[in-house]
Image (cartoon, rainbow, N blue to C red):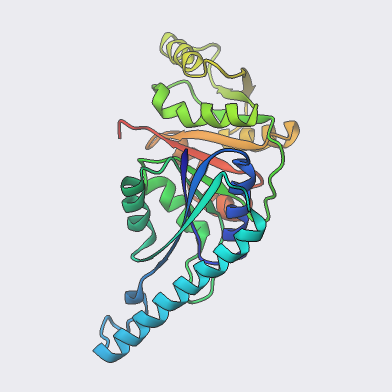
Amino acid sequence: MKKILIPTDFSRNAWDAIAYTADLFEGIACEIYLLNVYDYSDYATDNIMVPQLDDRLYDTLKSNSEKGLDQIMQRLSFRDPSEEHQYISISRQNNLVDALKDLVELKDIDLIVMGTKGDTDALNKTFGSNTVLVMEKVRSCPVLAIPPETVFLPIKEIVFPTSFKTHFKKRELSYLVDIAKILHAEISVIHILKEEELDDEQLNYKSLLKDCFEGVTYHFHTLENVHIHEATDLFVQIRHAGMIAFINKKHTLFSYLFSKPLVKELGMHAKVPVLALHDFRH
């Protein structure tokens, strides 16, 4: 049984992430945890509040959180009545990153799924920047970012950009392989050629990658004279790929893909889901 954690701020994009997850894992036994966080300290003026106001605000935020989750659960009873999916709602007074870290460990979560742009109303957080923050800070669990208004369609190809300059381990890529098997999708590895040929170290890492992708269909593609994020975007568009996946190794590919101003592009302009895996050595 897969254990999936989806934070929600009750926005349309957060709901789209929930619906996408239900369709992506159709027919797969899953425990799906729906998390809403609230932090009443955000509403303190100069961090000073009288106790009575403090208690009333806490009760209001807690009540709003629980009511919002109840509404989602009711909506899901019609949207996804499948017996394979068990939904559990969790309301927490905490910041988003710490709450996710706690639940990943407590529930042994396999995957976090997030909408990439949420409500900007005063009671909610904006998911655009939070999605990237979670990708960076919650490093013990893969994170799948779902762009606004994304409807699940059969995915035949997952794009995996790499420089062949970093080490690969099977456990780092296990969830990508798992997703590819569930979807019956092939993995397209794209490399931007900056030299005449791969050196011995790159050839070794390419060989390691082949070992990691054992059991799934994969192909290697080489592109020239283009930046990695532009190459990834063009490849996805031309081939109608359904997902991008990468390993978030600090100070390497992640910094190229999602450094400013690309952080905003992830939150506002991404066209397909993005799966962030993690380098477990860091």
In terms of depth relative to the viewer, which is nearer, 240 or 214? 214
Is 84 rendered above or below residue 279?
below
Q: Is residue 114 left or right of residue 79?
A: left
Q: Position of residue 146 (x, y in %)?
A: 59, 49
Is 235 rendered above or below residue 126?
above
Q: Is residue 155 left or right of residue 130?
A: right
Q: Residue at x 48, y 70 (%)?
A: 124
Q: Residue at x 32, y 75 (%)?
A: 41
In the rendered image, the residue lying farthest to the top is 200
- In which quadrant will I find the C terminus? top left
Q: How many marks?
A: 0
Q: Residue at x 29, y 82 (%)?
A: 46
Is 245 rendered above or below residue 17?
above
Quarter of the image for residue 272 reads top right
Q: Position of residue 148 (x, y in %)?
A: 64, 56
Q: Position of residue 269 (x, y in %)?
A: 64, 52
In terms of depth relative to the viewer, which is nearer, 36 or 192? 36
Q: Is residue 136 visible?
A: yes
In the rendered image, the residue lying farthest to the front is 83
Q: Position of residue 140 (x, y in %)?
A: 35, 40
Is 208 rendered above or below residue 132?
above
Q: Residue at x 53, y 75 (%)?
A: 121
Q: Is residue 168 visible?
A: no
